[in-house]
């Protein structure tokens, strides 16, 4: 069992408070981080993956050790799909994923096998030697998920993995995430309830840099005051004023 703990995490961008004193514990399982544009989802994911710093006074631990002091070991357990990334359109899928594998420090001898393993996991084996520039949005997203799966990470962070996908491709990506081994922590951000309601064990609702609620889909659904008790209506209850 893995444990990721955030204690008193805040983030200012200049005057702007993007995260407001978050304390959260994650254990193995799939988590949905749900919230509207600007809520702080990417900031939180970038902080966990050490791409953005946090304000003094906070602490993040992985299996009990402070990730700031132990960042080399911690980085090795992370697989990350950032939001809005550029893909190298002239690269083939295998070359792009192989390039990331090199950056991640995977041993040269293992790279080819590891690249084919993750491309198979996202059902992209047959396109391994095709150029990324010729892919649909859904195929590009799957390549990005594949690179996040390199090295079988114990902490998998996917920032809006279904962004820009059509409903059919959303289902493909959702099923893929739902089928991953459960012996890890998976955190998926989205502002689309249906992306996560069938696969997440726990949902965290984030608004203006604060976690405003957390629970399983049935637990959260019970909190709907008017209308059918489902997550979509809870989302509207919390964020309706923003739409
Ligand atoms: N580099 C930055 N400099 C200044 N402000 C930033 C920066 N990155 C994010 N912010 C601000 O912090 C807040 C949270 O942004 P963040 O990108 O984390 O939200 P998000 O929930 O990921 O939104 P989206 O759904 O649009 O991706 C927003 O108000 C945003 O404008
Ligand atoms: Mg974002």
Image (tube, helix red, strand yellow):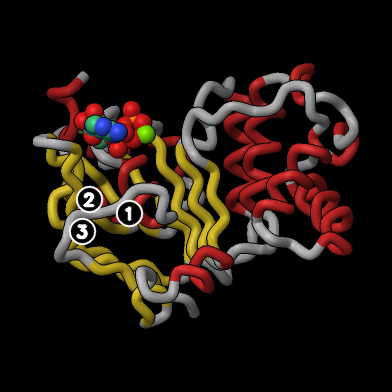
Q: Position of residue 92 (x, y in %)?
A: 82, 31
Q: Marks 3 and 1: which is nearer the front? A: 3
Q: Which mark is residue 218?
A: 1
Q: Which residue is mark 3?
A: 9
| Left or right for 64, reference 205 | right
Q: Which picture quadrant has residue 97?
A: top right
How far apart marks 1 and 2 lie (CA) works out to 6 Å
Q: Are marks 3 and 1 in contact (CB under 8 Å)?
A: no
Q: Which mark is residue 52?
A: none
Above or below residue 241? Residue 107 is below
Tell me which numbered mark, 2 or 3, is placed earlier along the sequence.
3
Q: Residue at x 40, y 37 (%)?
A: 190
- Where disc 2 sits, the SS reads loop
Q: Residue at x 44, y 36 (%)?
A: 194
Q: Are marks 1 and 2 in contact (CB under 8 Å)?
A: yes
Q: Is residue 94 visible?
A: yes
Tell me which numbered mark, 3 or 1, is placed earlier along the sequence.
3
């Amino acid at each position: 069992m893995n444990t990721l703990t955030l204690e008193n995490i805040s983030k200012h961008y200049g005057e702007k408070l993007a995260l407001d004193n978050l304390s959260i514990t994650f254990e193995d399982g799939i988590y949905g981080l749900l919230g509207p544009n600007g809520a702080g989802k990417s900031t939180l994911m970038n902080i966990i993956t050490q791409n953005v710093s946090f304000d003094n006074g906070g602490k993040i631990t992985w299996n009990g050790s402070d990730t700031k002091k132990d960042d080399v070991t911690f980085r090795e357990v992370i697989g990350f799909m950032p939001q809005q990334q550029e893909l190298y359109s002239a690269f083939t899928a295998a070359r792009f994923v192989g390039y990331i594998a090199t950056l991640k420090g995977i041993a040269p001898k293992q790279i080819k096998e590891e690249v084919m393993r993750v491309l198979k996991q996202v059902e992209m084996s047959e396109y391994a030697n095709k150029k990324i520039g010729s892919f649909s949005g859904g195929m590009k997203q799957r390549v990005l998920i594949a690179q996040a799966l390199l090295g079988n990470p114990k902490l998998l962070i996917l920032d809006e993995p279904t962004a820009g996908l059509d409903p059919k491709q959303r289902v493909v990506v959702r099923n893929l995430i739902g089928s991953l081994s459960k012996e890890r922590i998976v955190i998926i951000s989205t502002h689309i309830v249906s992306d996560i309601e069938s696969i997440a064990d726990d949902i965290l609702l984030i608004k203006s840099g604060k976690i405003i609620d957390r629970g399983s889909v049935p637990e959260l659904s019970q909190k709907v005051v008017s209308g059918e008790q489902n997550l979509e209506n809870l989302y509207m209850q919390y964020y309706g004023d923003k739409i």
